[in-house]
Image (cartoon, rainbow, N blue to C red):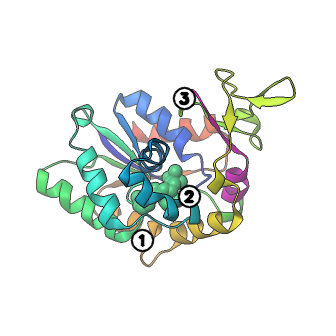
Amino acid sequence: MNILIFGPNGSGKGTQGAIVQKKFGVAHIETGVIFRENISKGTELGKKAKGYIDRGELVPDEITVPMILNRLKEDDCKDGWLLDGFPRNLAQAEALYEALEKEGIKLDYVIEIELDRQTSKNRIMGRRLCANDNNHPNNIYIDAIKPAEKDGTFVCRVCGGELSARADDQDEAAIGKRHDIYYDTETGTTAGINYFKDRAVVIGVDGKPGVKEVSEELLEKLG
Ligand code: AMP
């Protein structure tokens, strides 16, 4: 099963992605996670990507597209993948679709989590990352995944691990830029989603309700 998942930053895309990934047992590939790992390890790729990420801009396609197309060739992707954070614009959507066509790889589903810009922004500012596991979602503004408290500080609600906020999550200008890219219907992410509408099965779900309601609707639509 090969799946793309779209949703504005703050829509719960990572959370829903983890649920879908578990259900189908596919590799979960998150572009942002790959970049952040490279930044923390100080790799060449990380050094190249850091400035763009800090400003809320896209890392150039010349870097991102080959990185992802190569990642999809790795062993763990043989039984399927869930791609999150890529494509992020129309050019990446076209490059991915053409590469898949060439390799004879079927795109089974394209998931779109729909959420308005203001709600997405509030959710981003409340998001916290677990030091132990990237699939432990915490958000101080969403009751269902509110962190636990220990000695007056927030800790991961799943494992009690240390929490941190991503610098780009607290920067309103950067959030604005990321949303400008996402909601752009000309060349941005929404243009990329629209590109798939007559090329794959696109499943739209309302991202407004709680995690459980959204995942129920999503899993039902995935069949
Ligand atoms: P995310 O964790 O998905 O919000 O990604 C964090 C940052 O990584 C983005 O704001 C971009 O700077 C960069 N990034 C992630 N995915 C892509 C992509 N497909 N193309 C270019 N840059 C990306």
Q: Are marks 1 and 3 in contact (CB under 8 Å)?
A: no
129 is higher (above) or lower (below) than 169: above
**What secondary structure is found at the residue carrying circle 1?**
helix
- Mark 1 or mark 3, which is nearer to you? 3
- Looking at the rendered structure, the kind of residue marked 1 is Ala
Evaluate if marks 1 and 2 touch, with contact meaning CB atoms under 8 Å apart. no
Q: Is residue 216 left or right of residue 30?
A: right
Looking at marks 1 and 3 on the same chain, the residue that comes earlier in the sequence is marked by 3
Residues under labels 2 and 3: Cα distance?
A: 22 Å
- Residue 121 inside the magenta-drawn segment: yes
Q: Which residues are magenta?
A: 119-132
User: Which residue appears at 34% of the width and 32% of the height?
Assistant: 26
Q: Mark 3 packing: few (<14 Cα in 10 Å), some, or many (20+)?
A: few
Count numbered badges in the picture.
3
Q: Is residue 221 above or below residue 67?
A: above
The residue wearing badge 2 is 8
Q: Is residue 168 above or below residue 71?
A: below
Residue shown at the point (50%, 74%) measured from the top left: 184
Q: Which residue is the extreme one toward the right?
A: 152
The percent position of residue 71, horizontal first and vertical second, equals 27, 45
Q: Is residue 14 magenta?
A: no
User: Where is mark 3, residue-wise?
Assistant: 133
In screen coordinates, is 191 left or right of 66?
right
Q: Position of residue 127 (x, y in %)?
A: 68, 45
